[in-house]
Image (tube, grey):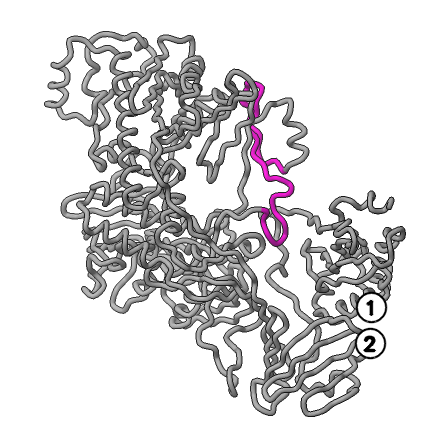
Amino acid sequence: MKNITIFNKWIDYHYNLNNKLLSSIQINLSINELFNNFIELSQNTLISIQFKIKFNNNQYRSVSYVQTVKLSEREALIENFIEFWDIRDQEYISLNPSIIIYTYKLIDKNHGIIVTSRLNRSKSLIHEKESKDSFIFKGYNLPSTMDFTTWGQVLFTSNHFAQVKKYNSNSIYHIEIYDKELKVTLKNKDYTILEFIDRPIENGKLSSFHRTLRNHEYVFIDNKCVLKKIKKENKFLTSIIGSASLSNKFITMDLETRAIDGIMTPYAACIYDGQNKTSFYLGDYLNSDQMLRSAIKYLMEPKYNNYRIYIHNFSFFDAIFLLRILSDLTHINIKPIIRDGRIIDLKFSFYIYDKSNILNLYFRDSYLLLPSSLAKLAKNFQVENKGIFPYEFVNNKDIPLNYRGPVPTREFYPDLTIEQYKSMFNSYEYWDLRIETIRYCEQDVVTLYQILSKFQNKIFSLFRLDILKYPTLPSLAFAIYRSKFMGNAKIPLIDGNLFNQLKKGYTGGSVDVYKPYGENIYRYDVNSLYPFVMREYPMPVGNPTLFEGDISIISEGNGYNLINRPFGFFEVEITAPENLGIPLLQTRIKTSGGTRTIAPLGTWKGTYFSEEIYNAMSYGYKFKILRGYLFDKGYIFKEYVDFLYNLKVNSEKGSPDYIISKLLLNSLYGRFGMNPQCENHLIINSKDSLDFINNNIITNVIDLKNGRELISFFEENEWSDEVSKKSLNISVSVSAAVTASARIHMNQFKNMRGINLYYTDTDSIDIDHPLDPKYVDKELGKMKLEHIFKEAVFLAPKVYGGITSEYELVKVKGLKNPVSYNELKTLLVKDTSLKVNQEKWYRDVSQGLIKIKPEIYTLMINNFKRILLYNESNQFTATSSIVLNDGEMTEY
């Protein structure tokens, strides 16, 4: 039994073909070499084995079904595998098969399974270049007619049965003949190779038919395969059970900072556990690090084990100061969950007394649950508000931490009126920086605690869920949906290669400038655009069906007809109408400003939601469908949206119920589209990092200057070619359908007769005439009039401004310091720029500080999504569409 010892672990047998085409000789050699490893076993031992192929594009395909034979029957097995290979689609060869893989297990009738093998696929990252053929699935090389007399040598035939020996093969078709179908079994001796059913499309015509083979379906028209389909078996999202009770295991924390000579560091910290307030002040310590260490050590007690520590804006701010300190205080590796640069959850584990006693703290960002300022949240939840503090006063390096003297002058209290400042000034005999800082900081942590407590109780009363289990608002909304509103919806879980393909059809809202200047401009916004389309538009549910070919051409009954609107995501070749004023369909292209999402004219290829394709057809777009995925339709969000929207409209604006319903309505759909493959992050000892780096794919390393390193990485075995190692309950098809449906809803306003469109954002339009009243109302999905501008300027996406009879409004994405409307208006002249002084923060996790540097923000027209047009006076007057020719820009 020496060989059993050799093979008593999971293994595969690989036969490298050196990129040559497979032949019966190679299959014979490879399987004989494999069998030679088992020469000491009984020839009556059974082997269950499957024949697979790996291609040069790193994809794998099963060639055979699982076959179970005795080891002594290798010749019959070889013959079967050659037959399997022979009937596979010849397109397999175009993918350059490079490796034969046999996945097997050996079975002894007396002792059960004695050896097992499995396929250990090589791993690849999602961000690597994808194969051009990754969307294509392969089928079988079988007869393209129902006339079985042409399949080979007819051995026997009657009214109900026939046998036909396959050409150039020992296999035989066993055919059962019925009025409207043929049931066919292809056998090699007593082994079944495959089974299929043929059904004619037209009576008496054997050249046009449907073929069903396991989960594959083929449509032949005049002996040509025009459509291939394969139904995928997917797992589905499951519901969850709510919490039986609430936990009060949470603490709020806050840091106060000051900026001296452009370096921002903490100078106070406060902690509140619902009963006790504890403060730490820099004047009592040698430096900020020592102060923060004391604050964290205060939490490292058994009574706080498994508590959540909430800090408002922890992800982008306080974490910069705390990561290095936390890593200093434990010997256990820290593995923060970070997505899009935000720390979702940071589990801080440490020993207490000895290594057998481990305690945990979980640092969270309360802003990710309640994305609003603390002052606004305090007002919404009707709790004690933040205090008033002269932030800039402490940034003066000449002000000592033990300052005790006159109240800082009014310039340090910009939000107070003269009367309010005088009242405050008169209330003090003297002003103590330490006392005022701690009072202000402690008020913040108490306010945050009260907000979270009210939020927690309100969510529990409405949905029986505890917010402490969900670190972000999308995760909470997702849990609410799964526990209360999902019902029996069959929402497919999408990952691996299927995620990669469907993600191509996932783009956001349309944001474009069409006319840069106008007078009497009406700005309209949609009432809850995404909740509206989630409620009113069908979503993709059920098992996805992969197809190749034009799905719009399929036969039913006795005719060759168009199927009634197949539903799903299709890869298509697109021709946009030449005379369309404002294009509708978006695609991603590379421009001089980087990869951009644009709405072009011309021709290109892309993946789109079927409903967006049909909508575009009504505007003159033409499509050739190449391949894609079909889904069933489901209205899966109606109850969720109805409940929250009714809660919103029946609540006083700004009340807790109003804020909660508004936040939850807009936080669900994006959770379905979360990327299943993301960077991992680990804080590890520097001495251990080399081995770790050698065994993973590293994207970034930050030296924390304390013998620890923060490493960002992808695990080598994180992602296979077809399926991820774990599911994150993701269904990107749902998110893509929501955003596509939102664009469909907005498209009706883009080419309206008699109305000029100046600017669009995801859920808003700026036009030069009022909308027809039928579009305007307080209802979900209707428009509401936000502004009437006497004049307005639109320079680029997210860069615009306008003046009304009462106020002016200016929005410039990325600019902290405000600019006036008139300043913005000067930029309509070609090559004009506006320089604005502003501070830029540089976060230094390694040093545990934030550097503040003055910089010049240069504002000018910078639009890479459309072509800018100027008149003879160099005035920016309009934009025109980029034109693509087979996906490449013809002009810009």
List x then y, in percent, for residue 692.
64, 31
The amino acid type, in three-letter code, at marker 2 is: Asn
Marks 2 and 1 in Cβ contact (< 8 Å): yes
- Residue 209 in which image quadrant: bottom right
Q: Which mark is residue 170?
A: 2
Residue ID for mark 1: 79
Alpha carbon separation for disc pair 2 and 1: 9 Å
List x then y, in percent, for residue 272.
32, 22
| Residue at position x 21%, y 11% in the image | 431
| Residue at position x 26%, y 20% in the image | 440
**732 relative position to 281: left or right:** right
Q: Which residues are magenta?
A: 697-725
The image shows residue 675, relative to residue 702, as above or below, that is: below
The image shows residue 442, relative to residue 508, as above or below, that is: above
| Of pointers 2 and 1, the one earlier in the residue sequence | 1
Is residue 637 a member of the stretch shown in magenta? no
Which residue is most to the front?
A: 110
Visible residue check, residue 299: yes
Looking at the rendered structure, the secondary structure element under dot 1 is helix
Neighbor class of circle 2 (other Cα within 10 Å; few <14, some 14-19, many 20+) is: few
The amino acid type, in three-letter code, at marker 1 is: Glu
**541 relative position to 194: left or right:** left
Visible residue check, residue 842: no
Q: Nearer the viewer, residue 607 or 188?
A: 188
Neighbor class of circle 1 (other Cα within 10 Å; few <14, some 14-19, many 20+) is: some
The image shows residue 737, relative to residue 711, as above or below, that is: below
| Residue at position x 83%, y 67% in the image | 76
